[in-house]
Image (cartoon, rainbow, N blue to C red):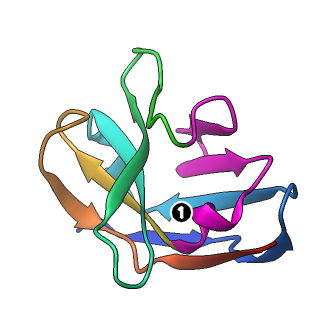
Amino acid sequence: QVQLEESGGGSVQAGGSLRLSCAASAFALDYYAIGWFRQAPGKEREGVACLAGRDSPRYSDAVKGRFTISRNNARRMVYLQMNSLKPDDTGVYHCATAVACGGDYNYWGQGTEVTVSS
């Protein structure tokens, strides 16, 4: 049973930083791809970052250069370092697993809320 639990969200001023963490149960990181998504009220869910195997991380244009996805398999943790935050980064952030970035994500965490104030 794959279990994912996000933490690290909060309220920050524009220009600030947050690091989100995704704690994974056993076997969760055996999936090839780990992604981070976000959703703001009234908006569609948006993929922001994905890490698959030994491939280079992928980022949406909106966060490229500001966000960094990483993982520590031994600790069963996935991270999203978010710098230079903007109000448009506000939303509920989820981590999820998939066979490949851009594929179907089958397991999701409950989400952690990020609010960026101008």
User: In the rendered image, which quarter contains the C terminus?
Assistant: bottom right
Residue type at numbered disc 1 = Ala
Query: In the drawing, does residue 44 fall left or right of residue 19?
Result: left
| Residue 12 point in image, percent of width and height | 83, 73
Instruction: Tell me: 69 left or right of 104.
Output: right
Relative to 20, say whether 49 is above or below: above
Q: Is residue 31 placed above or below 16 in the rendered structure?
A: above
The extreme left residue here reads 104
Q: Residue furthest bottom?
A: 41
In this view of the protein, which residue sits in the foreground, 29 or 84?
A: 84
Residue lying at 70% horizontally and 38% vertically, measured from the top left: 66
**x and y percent of residue 40 in the render?**
45, 76
At a point 57% along the width and 41% down the height, the residue shown is 63
Residue plotted at (59% across, 63% down): 88
Looking at the rendering, the stretch of residues picked out in magenta corresponds to 63-91
Is residue 89 located in the magenta-colored stretch of the structure?
yes
Mark 1 = which residue?
23
Q: How many marks?
A: 1
Res 103 quadrant in image: top left
Which one is nearer the viewer's eye here, 14 or 66? 14
Image height check: is 102 above or below 81? above
Q: Quadrant of residue 21?
A: bottom right
> Magenta span has 85?
yes
Q: Position of residue 91 (x, y in %)?
A: 53, 74
Quadrant location of the N terminus?
A: bottom left
